[in-house]
């Protein structure tokens, strides 16, 4: 009797040894892919290796090893992420703001006009700036997205059952069958018309749970800037993950 060898399970990631140290490479199985592909997204998520249908862990490891030189060069050339810290510049609704420690022990984060441009004034110990800025940005995102969803929902006569915020990297928004909408809080970093488009896109799914011509007609009625907003997200969206 002949026995087939059991195919080795594909893990979520592998560790690749580079000249500069070890790096984690996420593995992504894609039945539509025709070949192995190693890429480095523009955000800070780290390298990704796509495995085609029928691919194996052994071949993926060999492919990654043979492309170590390319990956190391890409990592070295990639701009460093900008943390939420005093002195850093972060976009808020598309405009750069300098993070400034206010020197006050208590209070809330405030956006203001500084002598050299917009600033975010952050109270308390500097070690807490990152958390406070993130919390403030999420609060601003919820307010803007709720307003946009309410406005677009009123136009089509449908209501979302709930709105939630996440830090998703694969999509900017989603609409569940029960009417729950979810968005990336990082949309608050983008220009207002981009956030408005994503809100309109998900609200349009309350009418058409697909991407048919009917869906796009609804989406463009809600957000005439749909085409330019989609282009902006393709060209600049990944950069929103380079903050924080």
Image (spheres, helix red, strand yellow):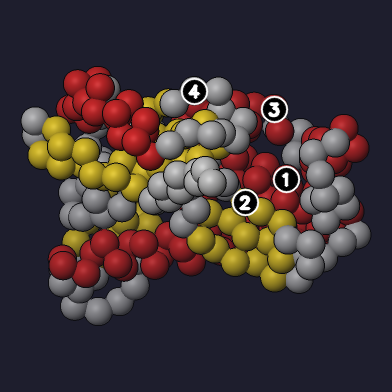
What is the CA distance from the residue labelled 3 to the residue labelled 1?
A: 11 Å
Pinpoint residue 90: horizontal percent, then vertical percent: 33, 46
Q: Which residue is mark 3?
A: 227
Q: Earlier in the sequence, mark 3 or mark 1?
A: 1
Q: Is residue 117 above or below residue 111?
A: above
Q: Which residue is mark 2?
A: 173
| Observer able to see residue 106 | yes
Q: Residue 148: which disc?
A: none
Q: Residues within 10 Å of mark 3 (few under 14, many from 20)?
A: few
Q: Which element type, helix, strand or loop, lies under badge 4?
A: loop
Q: Residue 201: which disc?
A: 1
Q: Residues within 10 Å of mark 2 (few under 14, many from 20)?
A: many
What is the CA distance from the residue labelled 2 to the residue labelled 4?
A: 29 Å
For the residues carrying marks 2 and 4, which lies nearer the camera in this image?
4
Asked if disc 3 and disc 4 are in contact, CB closer than 8 Å, the reply is no
Q: Which residue is mark 4?
A: 35
Q: Earlier in the sequence, mark 2 or mark 4?
A: 4
Task: Choose between 169 and 111: the one closer to the eye.
Answer: 169
Answer with left or right where residue 214 lies relative to residue 147: right
Q: Is residue 228 above or below residue 179?
A: above
- Which residue does the image show at 19% across and 21% down from the upper left? 69
Asked if disc 1 and disc 2 are in contact, CB closer than 8 Å, the reply is yes
State the count of labels.
4
């Amino acid at each position: 009797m002949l026995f087939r060898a059991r195919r080795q399970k594909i893990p979520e990631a592998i560790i690749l040894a580079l000249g500069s140290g070890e790096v984690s490479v996420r593995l992504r199985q894609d039945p539509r892919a025709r070949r192995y592909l190693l890429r480095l997204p523009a955000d800070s998520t780290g390298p990704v290796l796509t495995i085609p249908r029928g691919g194996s862990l052994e071949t993926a490891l060999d492919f990654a090893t043979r492309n170590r030189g390319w990956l190391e060069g890409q990592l070295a050339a990639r701009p460093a992420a900008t943390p939420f810290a005093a002195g850093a510049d972060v976009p808020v609704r598309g405009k750069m703001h300098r993070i400034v420690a206010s020197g006050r022990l208590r209070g809330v984060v405030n956006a203001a006009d500084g002598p050299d441009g917009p600033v975010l004034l952050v109270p308390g110990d500097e070690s807490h700036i990152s958390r406070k800025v993130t919390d403030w940005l999420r609060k601003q995102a919820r307010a803007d997205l709720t307003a946009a969803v309410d406005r677009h929902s009123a136009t089509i006569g449908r209501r979302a059952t709930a709105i939630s915020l996440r830090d998703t990297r694969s999509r900017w928004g989603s609409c569940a069958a029960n009417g729950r909408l979810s968005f990336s809080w990082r949309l608050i970093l983008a220009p207002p018309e981009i956030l408005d488009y994503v809100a309109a896109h998900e609200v349009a799914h309350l009418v058409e749970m697909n991407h048919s011509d009917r869906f796009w007609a609804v989406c463009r009625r809600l957000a005439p800037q749909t085409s330019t907003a989609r282009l902006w997200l393709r060209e600049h969206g990944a950069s929103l993950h380079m903050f924080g």
